[in-house]
Amino acid sequence: AQSVTQLGSHVSVSEGALVLLRCNYSSSVPPYLFWYVQYPNQGLQLLLKYTTGATLVKGINGFEAEFKKSETSFHLTKPSAHMSDAAEYFCAVSFNDMRFGAGTRLTVKP
Amino acid sequence: DADVTQTPRNRITKTGKRIMLECSQTKGHDRMYWYRQDPGLGLQLIYYSFDVKDINKGEISDGYSVSRQAQAKFSLSLESAIPNQTALYFCATTLAKNIQYFGAGTRLSVL
């Protein structure tokens, strides 16, 4: 069975600062890993995904994530936060079904 | 038009009532899912379906049932709604183990 743990339910950064959202997973088979973003009153949208191959994955809006098998991690980063990045972010792991973390709400301060 | 459409978008109902949430998709995907979202809990899988004849329980299926009427349609029913089923419900579709595409959600309140 697979599961996902997101460390920190709330993260607050200043505009222009580094964004780091943490995700650790457990899976009995090689996982597919995803980050989704949810803006208020909307469904989830894919930011990026890792399936196989290159462990550093680039997504939309300047986000990227690195798959580290030894650490069972898939942390999401963005070098410089923008006000429009304020949203809730979900890490997910997929095998036959998809399991989501509890989410991290990102606040960006001016 | 949206690829994944959920109806209704908002619903208020009373305890004990039967309610159905509907989902339709135009992506041609085989796999469809129902989730509920509660603050601080992320998305919890209720049911999922790999094709019309294949229905599977998720993490929290008690109190819910589903019907896959066609490849494009997957309905979620609450036979006798209770207040702790108040939540935001999402339908999603995917092709194999890949990206899930979500509907805009149904906000359900059970009084």
Image (cartoon, rainbow, N blue to C red):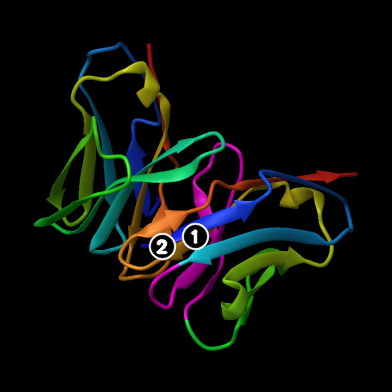
Residue type at tag 2: Gln
Q: Position of residue A80 (x, y in %)?
A: 84, 63
Image-quadrant location for residue B14 = top left
Q: Residue furthest left?
A: B53
Please determine whether, in this image, residue B45 is positioned above or below residue A1. Answer: above
The residue at which mark 1 appears reads as A92
> Does the magenta run of residues contain A32?
yes
Quadrant where the N terminus of chain A lies?
A: bottom left
Q: Can I make out residue B11 in this image?
A: no
Element at label 1: strand
Q: Position of residue A105 (x, y in %)?
A: 67, 44
The residue positioned 18% from the left and 24% from the top of the image is: B79
Q: Which residues are magenta?
A: A27-51
Residue type at tag 1: Ala
Q: Nearer the viewer, residue B47 or B24?
A: B47
> Does the magenta run of residues contain A79?
no
The residue at which mark 2 appears reads as A2
Marked residue nearer the N-terminal end (1 or 2): 2
Q: Position of residue B39 (x, y in %)?
A: 55, 34
Mark 2, Cα crowd under 10 Å, few <14 / some 14-19 / many 20+, is some
Q: From the viewer's perspective, tell me whether residue A9 is left or right of residue B64.
A: right
